[in-house]
Amino acid sequence: MTGPAARLAAIATACLAVMGAVPALAADTVKIGILWPLTGNAAAAGQASKAAAEVAADIVNDAHPDLGNLPLAKTAGLPNMGGARLELVFVDHQGSPSVAQQQALRLITQEKVDVLFGAYQSSCSFTATAVAERQGIPFMVGESAAANITGRGFKWVFRGTPIASDYAATYMRFFDDMKKRGKTIGSIAVVNENTDYGTSVADAIEAAAKKNGIPVAIRIPYSASSTDVSAQVLQLKEKQPDVVIFISYTADAILYIKTMRNLEYMPPMVIGDDTGFSDPSFIPAVADIAQGVMNRSAWDIGKPGSATYLINEMYKKKTSRDLDDTSARNMQSFFALADALNRAGAKDPEKIRVALSQTDLKPDQLMMGYEGVKFDSTGQNVLAATYLIQLHGKKYDLVWPDRAAEAQLQWPMKGWK
C-alpha cells in the first residue's frame, strides 16, 4: 500500500496504539455521608465510630481474603459496580438534632452523597432520617435504639442494630435466669437520660418488667447535661433496688458512678445500657470503682486468628484500643450497607433501597453476635441480638448467656471494695 491510503493506515495504527496505551478509567466512587457527634459530650463515641467506619471502608475497598465470609472482604471495591470504591464524607452534628437535620440536607444537596449513615444519638437520627425520607435517599442507622426511628412508616430508612424492645427482653431473660440461680431481684430501678434514646429504652424496660412481674421501685429521668446527680443517687439509696439499669451517655454515666462512690451507695448490680458504658473513656475514668458493672454488647473480639480478632487488630492498629460495642455495631451496619450497595449494582437510590430491603445476611457473614441481618417492612433488622458483659479489671468479659460466656458472672458486683 502506497500514497494517501498508506498514510491513513499508518495514522490509524498509531491512534489504536495510543488508545491501547491509555489506562482504563477508574471506577466511580460511591459517596457515603456519615453524621456523628465528633465534638461535644459524646465526641469520644463519635470519633471511635468514625475510626470503625474508616476500617470498614478499607476492608471493602481493598482485598482481605483472611476475613472469612464477611461480605466484600475477598474483593477490592464493589464488584458489581466495576470495583467502585467507597468514599466517606463525615460531618459533625455535635449531638444537636437541629444540626443533624441541617447537615443531612447539606450532605444530600451539596455533597451529593449517594446514601446516609449515622447518627449515634437517637434524637439526631430521628431528625436526619426524616430529611433522607423527604429527599428519597437511603439512610442506614448504625446504632440508635429509639423505637420511633423505624416506627414512622418510612421506606428509605433501615437500621442494623437491636432496638429498645430487644434490650428490654434481654434484661428480662437475664433476670429470670438469675432468679433460677438463687439471686434476689425483688425490684429494679431505671435511670434514663430524657431524650429519645433514654426515654424509649426506659419505657420498654418498664413495660417488660410489668409484664414479667418485676416491680420498678423508681424511675428517674434526668438531663444528660447534668453536672450534679446527688439527688438522684440519694433517691436510689432510699429505694434500695436489687438492680439499677442506667440508660446514659458518656459524661453522665461517669458522673453517676463517681457520685455513687462519693455517697457510699452500691446496689447488688448495676447494668449499663451500652452507650456511655461502652464509650472508650468510661473504663479509664471509673474502672477502679465500678468493678462488676454490667453492660450489654453484641461484640466479642473472638479467638486469635478469627475474623473478628483480625478486624479488632486492624482497629487497634489505627486507634491503639479495642473495638467497643457501639463502634462494632456501626461497623456491622456499615458492612450490611456496603453489601446492599454492591447488590444494587448502581448508584440509583431506588435500586439501593430495594437491595437493602432484600438483605439476608447469615450469622457466618457477620462480625457481631446477631442471628443475621434481615429488615422487616419498617426497616428494622429483626435478627439483631445482644449479650451481657461485665467489667473485670480493665476490660469487659462476656458473661451471659451461658452458651457464649467466656468468664464467670460476679454477683453482687464489687464496685470499689
Image (cartoon, rainbow, N blue to C red):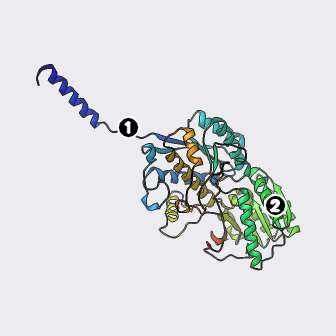
Q: Quadrant of the C terminus?
A: bottom right
The answer to which of 341 and 387 lies nearer the viewer is: 341
* Vertical side of 77 occupied by 15: above or below: above
Report x, y in % for residue 250.
70, 57
The answer to which of 120 and 377 lies nearer the viewer is: 377
Q: Secondary structure at mark 1?
A: loop
In this rendering, position of residue 171 left or right of residue 48: right
* Residue type at numbered disc 1: Leu
Report x, y in % for residue 304.
49, 70
Q: Which residue is mark 2?
A: 206
Q: CA distance from mark 1 to mark 2?
A: 58 Å
Indicate the quadrant where residue 273 lies. bottom right
* Residue type at numbered disc 2: Glu
Q: Earlier in the sequence, mark 1 or mark 2?
A: 1
Q: Residue at x 51, y 65 (%)?
A: 309
Q: Is residue 394 visible?
A: no
Q: Residue at x 73, y 57 (%)?
A: 164
Q: Which residue is mark 1?
A: 25
In this rendering, position of residue 293 left or right of residue 47: right
Circles 1, 2 touching at the beta carbon (< 8 Å) = no
In this rendering, position of residue 191 left or right of residue 312: right
Q: Is residue 293 visible?
A: yes
